[in-house]
Structure formats: structure tokens, C-alpha cells
Image: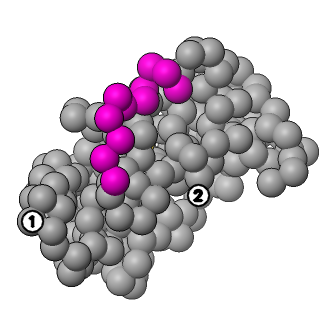
């Protein structure tokens, strides 16, 4: 993309606030990602190739290099040596573009302001869970972004600096957090065996 990223410290603070709320939402899936990573490692070790579309996203994608320009602009503000700090010593070839260089044994090594896709994407497995619980009604054969499922202010590219020219207000951030909180409550209620109202 030819547009230079403009990084705004206040916007990054808001981005991280939203990112933490999204992590809290994704935390409701419990051990799903850990189990997925374990299953993927076992399938790779066994030389399996069937079903790899459903493998751990961080092992088949490389969001660091797919989003290098914007990610580097943001992470360099936090730590100029950020890439050296997260890069794994040994490269193991996976499938697709992966594994992502930020992936460590305990998960992602980028502790704040990850690429937008990493914190907004719901994979097929997550979509199956949400549909089975009646929290959403959506297709499940491919990953979706959370804003495909619920109405959220379209502010993350502005906060991350990948889109210029639109001012984001604190009210936009609060509206995003409130919508996310409602979704989280619906999910929690459904897990407890409540009766969420379908969209
Ligand atoms: S987000 Fe989905 S594909 Fe990625 S590790 Fe978690 S369960 Fe697996
Ligand atoms: S940046 Fe982190 S969350 Fe995103 S693909 Fe890489 S390891 Fe996964």
C-alpha cells in the first residue's frame, strides 16, 4: 500500500484498550486455541495434509510479514528492537505462509497492538461454537471478522494508522467497547445454558 502509516500515541492507547476487550471476548473460547495448536502440531508431525485449512491460524498464516508496513510502524514506537525480540531462533517450515515468526511456545509474542486481523478474526471453529450456542447465525465454512457479525464502529484502521483522514472520538471507542460487551454477555449467558436471543 502506498500510504505511509501515521501513528498517533493516543489512538494506539485506545487500540490497545479495544484489543484487550477483544482478548477478553476470545478468552471465552477457553482451551480451543491451545487444543487447536496441539492438534496442528500432531498433524504436522504425522505428515498429514488433509484438513489443513482448519489448522492453527498462527501456524499457517504470517500476519507479521503480511502487515509488515503498518505493524513495524506501530511496534517501533513501543520498542525499536521489537522484531529481534519476538523472532524465533529456528525457522520451521509449515504450510501456507506460516508459521508466523511471532508465534512462541506460549502463544503470540507481540504483547500489544497486534495486527488488526489477529484480534478481530473468528475462525471456522469459533463460528461453529457461536452458532451452536445460538449467539450468532452465520456461515461457518470460512473465517469472518467480528464486525461481520455485530455492528461496530469502523475505527480500528484509523486507530492503527492504516487509514488517514478520519477523526476518531472517545465516544466511538466507547461505542465499540459497549457493543463488544453486549456480545460477550450473550456468549457468557449461552455458555451458562441461558437462552440468548438470536440476532
Ligand atoms: S483462532 Fe481458530 S484456527 Fe486460530 S488457533 Fe484458535 S481455534 Fe485455531
Ligand atoms: S502476530 Fe501473533 S497472533 Fe498474529 S499470526 Fe502472528 S503469532 Fe498469531
Q: Which residue is mark 1?
A: 46
How far apart marks 2 and 1 lie (CA) works out to 41 Å
SS under mark 2:
loop
- Residue 13 vertical placement versus 57 (above, below): above
Which percent across, then down, holds residue 10?
A: 70, 22
Badge 2 density bin: few <14, some 14–19, many ≥20, Cα 10 Å: some
Q: Residue 75 or 41: which is nearer the viewer?
A: 41
Answer above or below: position of 76 versus 169: above
Q: Is residue 91 above or below residue 51?
A: above
Quadrant position of residue 45 = bottom left
Any magenta on residue 151?
no
Q: Position of residue 82 (x, y in %)?
A: 53, 21
Please name the residue that numbered disc 2 is placed on: 152
Q: Quadrant of the C terminus?
A: bottom left
Residue 23 shown left or right of residue 166 in the figure: left
Q: Which of labels 2 and 1 is toward the front?
A: 1
- Residue 168 rendering spot, x and y as whole percentages: 76, 40
Total count of labels: 2
The reply to whether the magenta stretch includes residue 92 is yes
**Quarter that holds the N terminus:** bottom right
Residue drawn at x 31%, y 47% is 92
Which image quadrant is residue 54 in? Answer: bottom left
Q: Residue at x 27, y 73 (%)?
A: 52
The mark found on residue 87 in the picture is none
Which residue is located at x 62 percent, y 15 percent?
Answer: 80
- Quadrant in the rendering for residue 132: bottom left
The magenta segment is 83-93
Q: Secondary structure at mark 1?
A: loop
Q: Residues within 10 Å of mark 1 (few under 14, many from 20)?
A: few
Does the rendering let one see residue 172? no
Residue 64 seen in the current view: yes
Amino acid at each position: 500500500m502506498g500510504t505511509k502509516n501515521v501513528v498517533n500515541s493516543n489512538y494506539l492507547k485506545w487500540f490497545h484498550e479495544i484489543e484487550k476487550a477483544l482478548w477478553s471476548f476470545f478468552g471465552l473460547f477457553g482451551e480451543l486455541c491451545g487444543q487447536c495448536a496441539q492438534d496442528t502440531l500432531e498433524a504436522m508431525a504425522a505428515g498429514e495434509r488433509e484438513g489443513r485449512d482448519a489448522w492453527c491460524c498462527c501456524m499457517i498464516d504470517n500476519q507479521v510479514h503480511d502487515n509488515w508496513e503498518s505493524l513495524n510502524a506501530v511496534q517501533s514506537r513501543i520498542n525499536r528492537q521489537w522484531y529481534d525480540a519476538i523472532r524465533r531462533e529456528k525457522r520451521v517450515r509449515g504450510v501456507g505462509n506460516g508459521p508466523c515468526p511471532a508465534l512462541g511456545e506460549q502463544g503470540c509474542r507481540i504483547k500489544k497492538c497486534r495486527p488488526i486481523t489477529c484480534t478481530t478474526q473468528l475462525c471456522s471453529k469459533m463460528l461453529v461454537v457461536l452458532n451452536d450456542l445460538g449467539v450468532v447465525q452465520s456461515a461457518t465454512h470460512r473465517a469472518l471478522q467480528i464486525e461481520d457479525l455485530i455492528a461496530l464502529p469502523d475505527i480500528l484502521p484509523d486507530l492503527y494508522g492504516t487509514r488517514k483522514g478520519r477523526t476518531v472520538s472517545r465516544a466511538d471507542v466507547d461505542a465499540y467497547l459497549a457493543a463488544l460487551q453486549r456480545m460477550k454477555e450473550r456468549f457468557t449467558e449461552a455458555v451458562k445454558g441461558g437462552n440468548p436471543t438470536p440476532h
